[in-house]
Image (spheres, grey):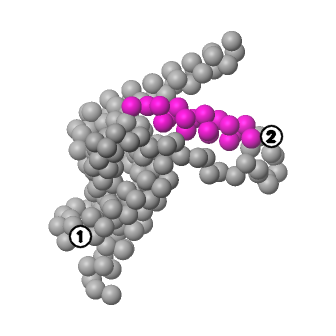
Amino acid sequence: MDDHRQRFEALALPHIDAAYNLARWLSRSPADADDVVQEAMLRAFRAFDGFRGEDVRPWLLAIVRNCWRSRAADVRRRAHAPLPAEDDRPLAFDGPDPEAEAARASDRRRLDLLIAELPEDFREVLILREMEDMSYREIAAATGAPIGTVMSRLARARGLLKELWLARDRDAVR
């Protein structure tokens, strides 16, 4: 195996789950996320000799983001909207407390739906910070936005998510 491939596998492949997670949230489709990640990994491999940084993850996630945006622009040009993805989580739980797990699963589905309602710029920084545990600096590098903009978008995303959650609670009581 050549040195280029070994370095790429050692530095980039550990972040493939983060790449898929971001692609899944951006595309809202497991199949599209697979395609986006495959394209991003291919682009990253081809450009890896030009990578000049310390942390591959923001660089790789920026490529995922750009692949998604290119794909989304193509879809919009063709005026084709992707179908919503089916929830592929199991319906039954074999754990010790099915009632508590059902409540947690319900909350998780509700949270997933509310996150999906957020504008893309807000959803993107929220996923990178809360699910991928990236720093503001890493998110700024991945999105190409200034750190202040990242912080602002994250605060607005959290606030909007809270408003949506509380609004659904109020609607459920009525």
Q: Is residue 129 left or right of residue 52?
A: right
Asked if the magenta segment contains residue 74, the reply would be: no
Residue 103, x across and y down, in percent: 73, 37
Asked if the magenta segment contains residue 115, the reply would be: yes
Which residue occupies the extreme bottom position in the image?
Answer: 1
Residue 69 appears in the picture as rendered: no
Residue at the image position 45 percent from the left and 24 percent from the top: 159
Q: Quadrant of residue 168?
A: top right
Residue range corresponding to the magenta coloring: 102-119
Q: Is residue 3 left or right of residue 127?
A: left
Residue 71, x across and y down, in percent: 32, 50
Q: Which residue is mark 1?
A: 46
Helix, strand or loop at label 2? It is helix
Q: Quadrant of residue 139?
A: top left
Q: Tell me the quadrant of the picture where the C terminus can be found.
A: top right
Near mark 1 (Cα within 10 A), the count class, few <14, some 14-19 or many ≥20, is few
Name the N-terminal-most of marks 2 and 1.
Answer: 1
**Prevailing SS of the magenta stretch:** helix
Residue 155, x across and y down, in percent: 39, 29
Residue at the image position 76 percent from the left and 51 percent from the top: 93
Residue 132, x across and y down, in percent: 44, 50
Q: Quadrant of residue 123?
A: top left
Residue 98 appears in the picture as rendered: yes
Helix, strand or loop at label 1? It is helix
Amino acid type at circle 1 is Arg
Residue at the image position 43 percent from the left and 53 percent from the top: 32
Q: Give the label on residue 99, or none.
A: 2
Q: CA distance from mark 2 to mark 1?
A: 49 Å
Give the answer, above or below, for where 174 lies relative to 152.
above
Amino acid type at circle 2 is Glu
Give the answer, above or below, for where 17 lies relative to 84.
below
Give the answer, above or below, for where 9 lies relative to 97.
below
